[in-house]
Image (cartoon, rainbow, N blue to C red):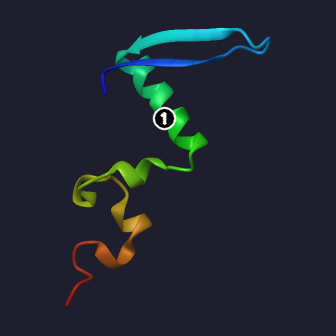
Amino acid sequence: FEKIRYEGFDPKGDPVVRVADGFHARVVQHECDHLIGRLYPSRIKDFSKFGFIEVLFPELAPGTQE
């Protein structure tokens, strides 16, 4: 999402409501993903466009299939 609204509590227990957009929204989503155990590669739909595929999945690198 390019714009998000999120809620939580500050260290004193007071409610916090924020809106983030652009890069800030992506950073918040990224950190929330970490909290629920999701890693960035799990969001990738097409690994052929993912950099370093030959490192992460050498068996899928071009030229290794027969």
Say above or below: 29 vs 46.
above
**From the viewer's perspective, is 40 left or right of 2?**
right
Q: Quadrant of the C terminus?
A: bottom left
Q: Position of residue 10 (x, y in %)?
A: 71, 13
Comparing 60 with 39, the one in front is: 39
Q: Position of residue 59 (x, y in %)?
A: 34, 79
- Identify the residue at image location x=50%, y=10%: 18
Say which residue label 1 marks: 30
How many marks the image carries: the answer is 1
* Residue 48 sits in quarter: bottom left
The quarter of the rendered structure image containing the N terminus is top left
**Residue 12 vertical position relative to residue 30 in the rendered view, above or below:** above
Residue occupying image coordinates x 37% and y 57%: 52
Q: In the image, is 44 to the left or to the right of 56?
A: left
Placement of 34 over or under 57, stated as above or below: above
Looking at the rendering, which quadrant does residue 31 occupy?
Answer: top right
> Residue 16 at x, y = what percent?
60, 10
Specify the amino acid type for callout 1: His
Q: Residue at x 49, y 19 (%)?
A: 6
